[in-house]
Each structure stands twice: as C-alpha cells, then as structure tokens.
C-alpha cells in the first residue's frame, strides 16, 4: 500500500503513480495531510509514502522535512521530479469574465500570484488543489474558479479555461518517497521529467552541540575540505530554545562513499549530532 497527500487528483498522486507505475490502482491510499502520510508509514499502515519536499518557486516544504526528522524510523529512498502546471478551472458554461473568486491550496495560489492580482480575484485557501476542485464541482458558484492540475478538472467534471497560469512556467516540485528504515527498499528512480540518473544524494541533519558563532561555517568547511559538494542547505529551529537551529544539508554523493563517512565522523567528533534522512539516486530535469 502506498500513501500519498490526497485527495485524488493532486500533484502528489501523480508523483506516486510515477514512482510506482506497475502498482494496481487499489494500492494507492489518499491521506488528508503530510503528517498523516508520515505517521501511516511509521506505524506500518502503508509500506511507502509520497510527499512533496521542495518546489522550484516556493522552496522547501517544511512540514515534510520537519516531519521526517521528528520520525527517526523513516528514511527517504527516492526523489521524484514532476513538472507543475497550474490551470484555471470552472463549472461548465462559465467564462473568465464571470470569475471574482479563486479557490486553491496556498502554494498554488502563491505560484499564480500575478495572474490573481491582475484580475483582482479574491482568494480562498483549501487543504489541496484537488479539494478546491471538488468543492467547486459541488457548488453552483459561477463566480468562482479553482486552480489545480488537469487531472483534478477531469475527475470533478470541470472545464479548464486558462492553461499553465503560474508566474513561472518552469515550475517543478521534488517529491520524496519514504519508507521505514530497513524495509529493503531499492533506491531506484522513476518519474516524469528526467533524462537519466547522474549520481546519488544523501540528506543529513546536523544539530550543533551548542549555539556558538561560526558553527555552520565549521561544519561546511568539513565537507569542503573533503571535496564534497552540497546541492541544498537550510536551517530550521530546534524547537527547544529560541535562537537555536539545526541544519539540513544535501550532499551530492552516496552514504557509502569514504569521504562522506569521514566528514560525518569529523562533525560528530566536534560534538555535533548527525542524523541521516536518506541516501538516494539523483534526478536531472530534461534538457538541463
């Protein structure tokens, strides 16, 4: 069973089907939130979970990375890249001039900010793009449009009147496939939008033993000295005391490489805590 951020018709469902193309349709279970997906994997209710991790416009999905750290029995086993195209959908027979209000997920609304602002539309937030489409389909509101994927319009019988309305057309989201540690998942990569697997990545969380000036620089210097390249770094509050942070880093190599093993050993020797969130194969966007 594969859990994903639902309901049906979301981009995450598309990513889940890309990750598991041979799975039967009954193997996919929509869930109401990212924490619900992670909990289901941790509790053994589903074997795998698919959740959004990063968007090329809006950045990191913090509820995902924070949730992974809070559940140490989980690990990332794959990354999925998916092109995100946001469409404007309405009830059949409605035209764009009738629209005064738009419904969608906060991320989708933010990605289409210029489109919404130029048309002076009111915004109403929903838990997902698919939930907004479903609510519109059940309403009789001819003054409302929803923003979301083509599949949501198809599933709920809505008409798409504007295609790909995001402010930036090169809009991609990176999704994580997560499983419980030690379940035997093979780190293979599938999905839309990539040429071939170029390399592996490893995601770590470094929690400094104390908050002192230059602590991040000292950690980064270890990776640099051992010739390791970082593709992503972000600081997050420890939630223990104001002004204390932990650092999420993604290194462009697998956990099995000696240079990464040595760097982890050095960082831990400084007294810092290192948690491995996963080591997985990297995807490259087509044409890049």
Image (tube, grey):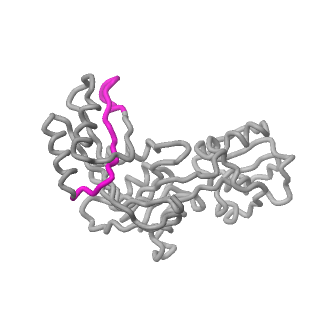
Residue at the image position 38 percent from the left and 61 percent from the top = 78
- In the drawing, does residue 226 fall left or right of residue 112? left
Side (left or right) of 133 relative to 195: right
At which x and y percent is residue 161? 79, 56
In percent of width and height, residue 73 lies at 27, 53
Q: Residue at x 48, y 67 (%)?
A: 195
Residue 239 within the magenta-colored segment of the rendering: yes
Question: 40 above or below 246?
Answer: below
Q: Is residue 138 above or below residue 235?
A: below
The image position of residue 57, as x and y in percent, is 56, 44
Question: Which residue range is magenta in the image?
Answer: 237-256
For the point 34% across and 31% down, the residue is 239
Q: Residue 50 magenta-drawn? A: no
Of 228 and 182, the residue lying toward us: 228
Q: Quadrant of residue 11?
A: bottom right
183 left or right of 165 in image: left
Mark yes or no: residue 138 visible: no
Horizontal side of residue 79 vs 9, given as left or right: left
Q: Check the image and report above or below for 137 versus 47.
A: above
């Amino acid at each position: 069973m594969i859990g994903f951020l639902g309901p049906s018709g979301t981009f995450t469902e598309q990513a889940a089907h890309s990750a598991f193309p041979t799975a039967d349709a009954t193997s996919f279970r929509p869930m109401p939130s990212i924490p619900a997906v992670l909990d289901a994997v941790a509790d053994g209710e589903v074997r795998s979970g698919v959740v959004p991790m990063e968007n090329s416009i809006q950045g990191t999905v913090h509820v995902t990375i924070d949730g992974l750290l809070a559940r140490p029995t989980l690990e990332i086993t794959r990354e999925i890249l998916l092109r995100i195209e946001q469409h404007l959908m309405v009830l059949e027979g409605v035209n764009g001039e009738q629209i005064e209000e738009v419904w969608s997920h906060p991320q989708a609304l933010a990605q289409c900010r210029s489109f919404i602002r130029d048309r002076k539309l009111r915004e109403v937030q929903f838990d997902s793009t698919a939930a907004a489409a479903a609510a519109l389909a059940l309403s009789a509101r001819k003054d409302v449009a929803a923003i979301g994927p083509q599949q949501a319009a198809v599933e709920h019988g809505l008409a798409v009147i504007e295609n790909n309305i995001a402010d930036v057309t090169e809009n991609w989201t990176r999704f994580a496939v997560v499983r419980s540690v030690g379940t035997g998942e093979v780190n293979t990569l599938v999905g839309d939008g990539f040429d071939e697997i170029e390399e592996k990545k490893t995601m770590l969380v470094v929690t400094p033993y104390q908050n002192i000036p230059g602590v991040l620089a000292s950690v980064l210097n270890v990776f640099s000295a051992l010739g390791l390249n970082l593709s992503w770094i972000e600081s997050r509050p420890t939630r223990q005391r104001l002004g204390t942070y932990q650092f999420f880093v993604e290194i462009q190599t697998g956990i099995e490489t000696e240079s990464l093993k040595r760097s982890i050993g050095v960082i831990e020797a400084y007294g810092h805590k290192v948690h491995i969130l996963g080591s997985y194969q990297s995807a490259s966007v087509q044409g890049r």
